[in-house]
Image (cartoon, rainbow, N blue to C red):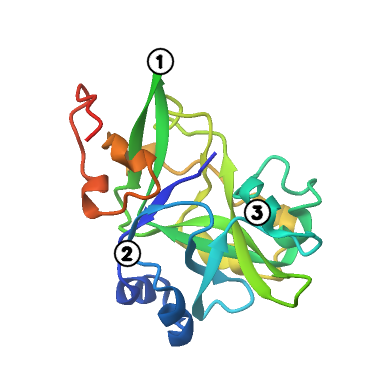
Amino acid sequence: MCGRSSLTKNEKELEERFNATFYSDELESYNPIPNFNVAPTHYMPVITSSDPEHIHIFRWGLLPFWSKDEKIAYKMINARVETILEKNSFKKAVQSRRCLVPMDGFYEWKRSGKEKLPYRIVTTDQEIFSVAGIWERWKSPEGKEIYTFSVITKPPNEIMEGIHDRMPAILLPEQEKLWLDEELPAQEAIQLITDYPANNMKAYRVSKRVNSVKENDKTLIEAIPENNNTLF
C-alpha cells in the first residue's frame, strides 16, 4: 500500500517540471503545497488525461461515480495494477481517466521486531517524479461535485522489497505522455508500469513523527541514523 507521500516543491517548480500551469482559483482554494506528510483525503496536484496542459487539485481517495456516499474513499486510495482492469471500482477510470500524481518522495514502514520503522523513498535521478493514477468526478446526492484520485501500486523492486511488499507505480519521464494519452487502450497503458530502476532510488530512515498526519514540517524528510529508535 502507498498511504503517505511528500511534495515539498512549489507551484513554479511543478509547472516547469510538467510543462503545465495551475488554475489560480484551485490553488488559492486549497493551497496544498509544500506538504511534507501527504495523507489520504488531502487535496493534492494531479495532471489529467483530459487536460494535460493544466495542474488540477484533486482529493486523494477515489470516489467512483456510483458511490452512495464519501465513506468508500478511505478504502480507495490505491489500485493494484494486477487487478485494476477487473475491479468495477477502477476499470472504467483506467480506460479514460488516467492521471499523473506528482511526488518528491513517499513513506513506507519496515517491520523491525515488534515495531514498524518509517522510511522515506526518493528518486535520485528526478527531483519530482510522477506516479500513475486514475481519477473520478463524483456528485453527491446534494449536487456537490468532488474530484478524486487513486494511486496505482505494484510489487516492489529491489530497493523496496526489503521494506514493504508494495510500492507506487513510478513512471519514467518518457512514459508520462503515453500514460495520459486517451487513445492508448487501457491494456497497453498498463504495460507501461514496470520496475523503476532501483539504482535510481534511495531509501532512508526518518523520524517516527511522520506516523502522525498532524505532523507536517521539513524535519520529517530529514534522515536519522539507522540505530536511532527515538520518537522524535
Point 42% across, 72% down: residue = 18
Gap in Å between the C-alphas at discs 2 and 1?
33 Å
Q: Secondary structure at mark 2?
A: loop
Task: Report the residue marked by disc 3.
Answer: 73
Badge 3 amino acid: Ala
The residue carrying pointer 2 sits among few (fewer than 14), some (14 to 19) or many (20 or more) residues within 10 Å by Cα, namely: some
Distance from disc 3 to disc 1, alpha carbons, whole Å, reads 30 Å
Q: Which residue is mark 1?
A: 114
In front of the other: 118 or 121: 118
Please tell me in which quadrant of the rendered image residue 148 appears: bottom right
The one nearer the camera, 204 or 42, is 42
Looking at the rendered structure, the kind of residue marked 1 is Lys
- Lateral position of residue 79 relative to residue 116, left or right: right
Please give the residue where the numbered disc 2 appears in the rendered image. Answer: 34
Residue 154: image location, x then y, percent: 58, 40
Q: Residue at x 52, y 60 (%)?
A: 175
Label 1 element class: loop
Name the front one of labels 2 and 3: 3
